C-alpha cells in the first residue's frame, strides 16, 4: 500500500445529495447537501448523462460546472474537516463539503495526480481538484468562505471511475499506484488559484483534466512568446 497517514486509509462514509433549491446557483438548485448512506453504493463512470455523478443516487444540478467522467467522485479527508470544524467552531458532518467520499488515514492533499485508489471492486483515479464557488460559499454560510478555502489550499480531490464497483463505509482505501512526477493535489490547486507561475508543472501529469492542462499550455505559450520578443 502507498500513501497512508498514521492509520491505514479507510472510507468513513459514502455521501449522496438530492436536488434542493438554492439562491446561490445560476440554476437555482444544488446537490451539495450530501448525507451519508447506509450499505454499499455503486460507483461508475457517468459518461455524458446529465443529472448524475459517478455515485448512483447522487444528483448533479449545475451540469456546466459539475459532473461528468472527470468529476465523477469527490473525496475529502475527515482530518481536514476536523481542522475546519475546530476553526469554524461548528460541527461539520461527513458530506457537508459536498464530498461523495469521506476518508480517514489518507492525506488527500498530498495525493498525486494520476494515483489510483482501490476501494472494494472499484478503481478510482485522482484527476483534478475542487475550486470553490459561490454555491459552496452560500451553503456553508461563512463570511469570506471562498477566500478562506482558497488560502488554506486543502481542496479535496476529484476522481475518475476506471473500474466500477460497490463502495461502502469501513472499506479500506488502497493506493495501488502512484506516478513518479510528484504533482500533488495541493500543488495543482495552488497553480490554478494563487500561484499561476506553477501552471507549467501541470503538464507533467497526463491524468490531469484537459481544462487544467490547457491553462498550463496557455501560460507556457505566453511565457515563450514573451521571452522570444
Image (cartoon, grey):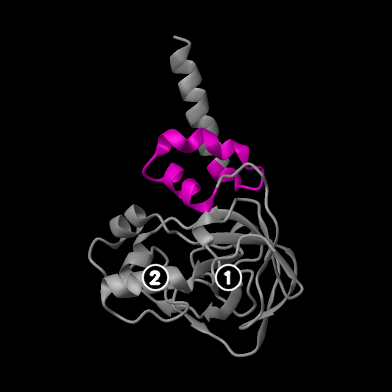
> Looking at this view, is 31 or 170 the one in front?
170
Residue 3 vs 104, above or below: the answer is above
Principal SS element in the magenta part?
A: helix
> Mark 1 — residue?
51
Image location of residue 107, percent across then percent down? 52, 62
Q: What element carries label 2?
A: loop
Left-right relation of 224 to 122: left
The region drawn magenta spans 184-212
Q: Quadrant of residue 125?
A: bottom right
Quadrant where the C terminus is found in the figure:
top left
Q: How crowded is mark 1: few (under 14 residues within 10 Å), some or many (20 or more)?
A: some
Residue at 47% across, 58% down:
130
> Looking at this view, is 57 or 197 the one in front?
197
> Mark 2 — residue?
28
Residue at 59% across, 36% down:
203
Tell me if residue 65 can be seen: no
Left-right relation of 228 to 92: right
Looking at marks 2 and 1 on the same chain, the residue that comes earlier in the sequence is marked by 2
Amino acid at each position: 500500500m502507498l500513501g497512508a497517514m498514521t492509520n491505514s486509509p479507510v472510507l468513513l462514509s459514502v455521501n449522496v445529495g438530492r436536488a434542493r433549491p438554492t439562491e446561490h446557483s445560476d440554476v437555482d438548485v444544488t446537490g451539495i447537501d450530501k448525507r451519508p448512506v447506509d450499505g454499499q453504493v455503486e460507483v461508475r463512470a457517468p459518461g455524458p448523462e446529465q443529472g448524475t455523478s459517478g455515485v448512483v443516487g447522487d444528483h448533479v444540478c449545475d451540469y456546466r460546472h459539475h459532473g461528468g467522467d472527470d468529476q465523477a467522485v469527490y473525496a475529502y479527508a475527515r482530518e481536514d474537516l476536523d481542522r475546519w470544524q475546530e476553526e469554524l467552531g461548528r460541527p461539520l458532518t461527513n458530506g457537508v463539503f459536498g464530498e461523495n467520499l469521506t476518508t480517514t488515514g489518507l492525506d488527500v492533499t498530498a495525493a498525486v495526480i494520476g494515483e489510483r485508489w482501490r476501494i472494494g471492486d472499484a478503481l478510482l483515479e485522482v484527476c483534478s481538484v475542487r475550486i470553490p464557488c459561490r454555491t459552496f460559499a452560500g451553503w456553508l454560510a461563512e463570511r469570506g468562505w471562498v477566500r478562506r478555502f482558497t488560502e488554506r489550499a486543502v481542496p479535496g480531490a476529484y476522481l475518475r471511475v476506471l473500474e466500477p464497483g460497490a463502495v461502502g463505509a469501513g472499506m479500506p482505501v488502497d493506493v495501488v499506484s502512484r506516478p513518479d512526477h510528484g504533482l500533488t493535489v495541493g500543488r495543482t490547486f495552488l497553480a490554478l488559484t494563487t500561484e499561476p507561475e506553477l501552471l507549467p508543472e501541470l503538464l507533467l501529469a497526463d491524468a490531469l483534466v484537459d481544462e487544467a492542462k490547457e491553462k498550463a499550455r496557455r501560460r507556457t505559450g505566453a511565457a515563450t512568446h514573451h521571452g522570444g520578443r
